[in-house]
Image (tube, grey):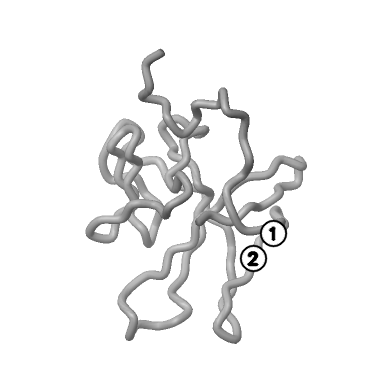
Amino acid sequence: MPDDMQDDDDGVREAILLKLGGEDDDAEAVVCWLNYCQHMTHIKLDKGSGAPIRDGEVICVNHGALFAADSGECTYGPCEGAFLNELDVAVADGGVYLADEEFEYVGEGPVESDDDDLSSSSNVIL
């Protein structure tokens, strides 16, 4: 489930955390990305049940875009060459903490949205 962040403009945005490597790897290998595809930036990568990941790449299920989990670079799809927006995090005492001065942690879970908001289902035809 994504975490909610508030930016300096008072807008609540979602972020996703990814642990890089396997269980035996460095515990501090964690990255944090804003939870939005770079092709259409209102489309969420994690729609509430976890961002889909395959072979070390985060998948945008709306457009088929692939983002390298470690760098955030789009390696395939309509936004190829673009990068996910990274947030600074710190790992301490077994927890991951927001360390980005542009954002404030405001809670866990998806941002509540209007039922008419199709931002997570842009391929629906009405």
Q: How crowded is mark 1: few (under 14 residues within 10 Å), some or many (20 or more)?
A: some
> Pointer 2: what residue?
98
Determine whether 38 is above or below 29 in the image.
Answer: above
Quarter assignment of residue 45:
top left
- Work out which quarter of the rendered image holds the C terminus and state it: top left
Residue 29 higher or lower than 9, as above or below: below
Q: Which mark is residue 105?
A: 1
Q: Which residue is drawn at 28% across and 37% down?
A: 64
Q: Say what secondary structure mark 2 lies in.
A: strand
Q: Nearer the viewer, residue 40 or 62?
A: 62
Q: What residue type is labelled 1?
A: Tyr
Q: Residue at x 63, y 71 (%)?
A: 97
Tell me if 49 is positioned left or right of 2 in this view.
left
Look at the numbered discs 2 and 1 and tell me whether their residues touch, using CB distance below 8 Å: yes
Residue 102, x across and y down, in percent: 70, 53
- Measured as percent of width and height from the top left, residue 72 is found at 40, 52
Vertical order, 107 against 117 (above or below): below
Distance of label 2 from label 1 (alpha carbons): 7 Å
